[in-house]
Image: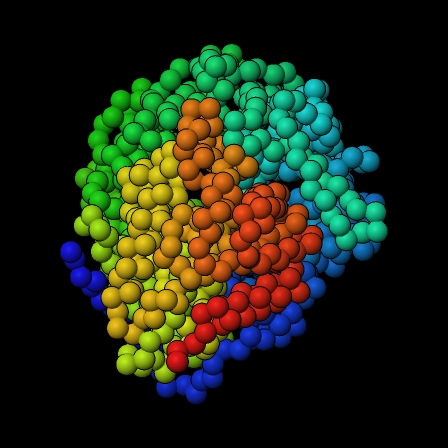
């Protein structure tokens, strides 16, 4: 069996990184305290700065906080750093009031963190009192665009700036920015029929959490592609806010595994003249098709859309004539498990396109001809292209984020399209998140490591750092002692390798025996043992102060080592994850400084499921903290669950075997269960079902619920209580080193 390999935590350092490490080492520091992290009024902010928004090749926008959720958006000259407000706030507010906005609402509208802008970046939209206003940045002229009792949602300027599209009362509208003429493009919107706006499950599992807009302007601004979602048959779920004297109900459509999904149609509306054309999805109704991506070809004549069957075992890229709706299939993707979408095709001048695919088990970049035939693979190997950021066609180059140097980090590369040659642009080890100027001559890099909060730097085309834009979060940490982890590779029983972080207390003594708490997420392709800043490691500093070792070990399906690493969970979520997690525990038990009787596990969401599963399907852990867990996959949403587990009717035994609630009688160890009572993602029903089953089995456990709390805990008072609850439970059940 392989022995664990000890690795360097930071890899090769540049002079900037060495200087940062030197400052951390020599500056007087103190331990982080609970109040430093969680006091509602005193807590320190170590979060990532906002991502800059490029508006030209030389300038980007950057919000400057003014307090009380008020911001001034600055227009920053990239190379010099000189900044000025994007517009005169006083003139904009006065213009809004003159156009009919309430003065208080005008002030709020003008002081937002971001705005909807057109491609020319010479105008933006403001929303005040439920109506839309158009602000020209050069003249500060304000035009009121709407005057209705209904609220305009998801508003977006056309690329040419001539029109604004929005959703009102579930229908799609456009209004001209010059004359204010309004046109209604759809007429059948209702509580059950959504035109141009996503429902809960589509935004959560397909287009991105919080992204509800479901319409797409053509490049010439003449048409709108949009989704129509019919939720008539989708079951409703009800959450209860128990805090008011008269409890308030929140009822919304939520399809669980096996339930009817919203029925999707893809339409194209003529923004100038009205009229609709419906695109042929090229999928029979029996496939219950999902429309998972929509975009346009550069000539604005065709809609490129991606369709999957309900269980997501295939994905088709189709092209439809925007005028007639006639479609043809360009290509089909399949794997031996499920297929995930990876963004729109990137069209090249000759009509060919670049395409990301996991067809080999590793996500790579491919060049396809216009008819869909493969020209060549531009990248290959046992690493991933995580994202295609853009294509500079004049230079014949693409810009990528990849794991080529290892799965713990994320680097930016420039790829030459002619020969596939790659140039590394980010020599510093860690995780890099780039945002490029339109010409790719400049870009910003948000860079962090496991021990360094994010730093934003301005970078030139060749990767040379021009200046530091923002390093306030990193500077705040320099006054504190942050105990960085050791990087390890740990063997599995069948010869595999897992990546791990090992955090040890400051006064660690290898002659003593320590309890260990494992922090996990464990979900497919969602690693935690990565070289990236993670606020959870701040909480771990407090755990270390209790004399408890912190263990972060990615089971292979969560490793980020290609789609191929995730496929073992197909139809049996929980089983391969626990096998790997227990192999990690076996390695811990072989260490002379580990108290094998005091090992625990904690996680939230999928990690909460994994903690509950580990305590009901194994005996490796003395305690567990299961936060907002799925406790029966039949309780979770259709699109995510069926991708992994298939329909319940097709995999009944898999659903039964993987349910912590159905295995409650086998609970081993002390369990703390917590859940937000307004969790619209993983419903509190999950915790209730597990709690009831444990009660019926006569198993002791603890349960904490949080009123008016969603899946992510954000209320400062709730966060403070929740963090203290977990810290106290760890100290009580595991204790410190003897």
| x and y, in percent, of residue 286 in the image | 48, 14
x 60%, y 21%: residue: 269
State the quadrant of the C terminus.
Answer: bottom left
Q: Is residue 661 shown to the viewer in this render?
A: yes
When asked about the image quadrant of residue 430, the answer is bottom left
| x and y, in percent, of residue 552 in the image | 36, 61
When asked about the image quadrant of residue 41, the answer is bottom right
| x and y, in percent, of residue 373 in the image | 27, 22
x 58%, y 59%: residue: 702
| x and y, in percent, of residue 478 in the image | 44, 78
x 26%, y 62%: residue: 587
In this view, which residue lies farthest toward the front?
A: 698
Could you say which is closer to the camera, residue 447 or residue 571? 571
Would residue 683 be found to the left or right of residue 641 on screen?
Answer: right
State the quadrant of the N terminus.
Answer: bottom left
Could you say which is closer to the camera, residue 63 or residue 514? 514
């Amino acid at each position: 069996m392989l022995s664990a390999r000890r690795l360097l935590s930071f890899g090769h350092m540049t002079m900037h990184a060495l200087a940062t490490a030197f400052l951390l080492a020599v500056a007087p520091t103190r331990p982080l305290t609970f109040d430093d992290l969680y006091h509602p009024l005193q807590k320190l902010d170590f979060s990532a700065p906002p991502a800059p928004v490029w508006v030209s090749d030389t300038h980007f926008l950057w919000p400057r906080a003014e307090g009380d959720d008020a911001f001034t958006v600055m227009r920053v000259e990239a190379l010099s750093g000189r900044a000025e407000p994007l517009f005169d706030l006083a003139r904009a507010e006065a213009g809004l009031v003159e156009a009919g906005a309430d003065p208080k609402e005008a002030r709020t509208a003008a002081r937002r963190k971001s705005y909807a802008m057109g491609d020319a970046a010479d105008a933006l939209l403001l929303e005040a009192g439920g109506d839309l206003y158009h602000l020209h940045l050069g003249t500060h002229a304000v035009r009121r665009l709407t005057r209705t009792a209904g609220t305009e949602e998801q508003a977006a300027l056309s690329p040419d700036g001539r029109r604004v599209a929005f959703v009102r009362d579930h229908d799609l509208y456009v209004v001209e920015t010059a004359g204010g003429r309004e046109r209604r493009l759809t007429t059948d919107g209702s509580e059950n029929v959504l035109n141009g706006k996503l429902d809960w499950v589509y935004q959560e599992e397909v287009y991105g959490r919080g992204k509800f807009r479901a319409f797409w302007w053509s490049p010439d601004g003449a048409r709108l592609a949009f989704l129509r979602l019919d939720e008539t048959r989708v079951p409703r779920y009800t959450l209860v806010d128990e805090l008011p004297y008269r409890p308030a109900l929140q009822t919304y459509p939520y399809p669980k595994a096996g339930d009817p999904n919203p029925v999707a149609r893809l339409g194209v509306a003529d923004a100038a003249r009205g009229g609709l054309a419906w695109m042929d999805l090229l999928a029979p109704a029996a496939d219950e098709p999902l429309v998972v991506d929509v975009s346009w070809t550069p000539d604005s004549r065709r809609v490129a859309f991606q369709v999957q069957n309900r269980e997501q075992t295939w994905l088709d890229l189709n092209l439809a004539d925007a005028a007639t709706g006639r479609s043809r299939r360009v290509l089909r993707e399949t794997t031996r498990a499920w297929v995930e979408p990876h963004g729109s095709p990137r069209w090249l001048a000759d009509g060919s396109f670049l395409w990301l695919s996991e067809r080999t088990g590793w996500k790579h970049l491919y060049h396809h001809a216009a008819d869909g035939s493969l020209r060549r693979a531009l990248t290959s190997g046992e690493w991933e292209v995580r994202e295609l950021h853009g294509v500079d066609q004049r230079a014949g180059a693409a810009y990528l984020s990849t794991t080529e140097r290892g799965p713990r980090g994320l680097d930016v590369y420039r790829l030459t399209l002619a020969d596939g040659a790659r140039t590394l642009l980010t020599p510093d080890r860690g995780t890099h998140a780039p945002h490029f100027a339109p010409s790719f001559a400049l870009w910003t890099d948000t860079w962090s490591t496991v021990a360094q909060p994010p730093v934003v730097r301005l970078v030139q085309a060749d990767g040379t750092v021009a200046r530091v834009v923002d390093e306030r979060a990193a500077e705040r940490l320099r006054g504190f002692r942050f105990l960085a982890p050791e990087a390890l590779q740990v063997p599995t029983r069948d010869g595999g390798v897992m990546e791990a972080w090992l955090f040890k207390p400051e006064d660690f003594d290898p002659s003593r025996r320590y309890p260990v708490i494992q922090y996990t997420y464990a979900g497919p392709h969602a690693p935690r043992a990565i070289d990236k800043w993670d606020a959870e490691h701040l909480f771990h500093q407090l755990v270390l102060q209790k004399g408890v070792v912190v263990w972060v070990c990615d089971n292979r399906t969560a490793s980020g080592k290609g789609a191929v690493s995730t496929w073992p969970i197909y139809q049996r979520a929980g089983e391969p994850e626990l096998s790997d997690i227990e192999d990690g525990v076996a390695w811990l038990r072989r260490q002379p400084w580990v108290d094998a009787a005091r090992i625990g596990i904690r996680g939230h969401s999928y990690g909460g499921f994994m903690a509950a599963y580990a305590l009901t399907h194994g005996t490796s852990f003395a305690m567990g903290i299961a936060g907002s867990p799925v406790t029966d996959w039949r309780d979770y949403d259709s699109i995510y669950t069926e991708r992994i587990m298939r329909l319940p009717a097709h995999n009944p035994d898999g659903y039964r075997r993987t349910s912590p609630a159905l295995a409650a009688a086998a609970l081993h160890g002390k369990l703390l269960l917590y859940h937000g009572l307004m969790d619209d993602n993983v419903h509190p029903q999950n915790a209730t079902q597990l709690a009831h089953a444990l009660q019926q089995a006569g198993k002791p456990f603890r349960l904490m619920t949080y009123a008016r709390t969603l899946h992510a805990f954000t209320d400062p008072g709730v966060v403070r209580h929740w963090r203290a609850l977990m810290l106290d439970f760890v100290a009580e059940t595991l204790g410190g080193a003897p």
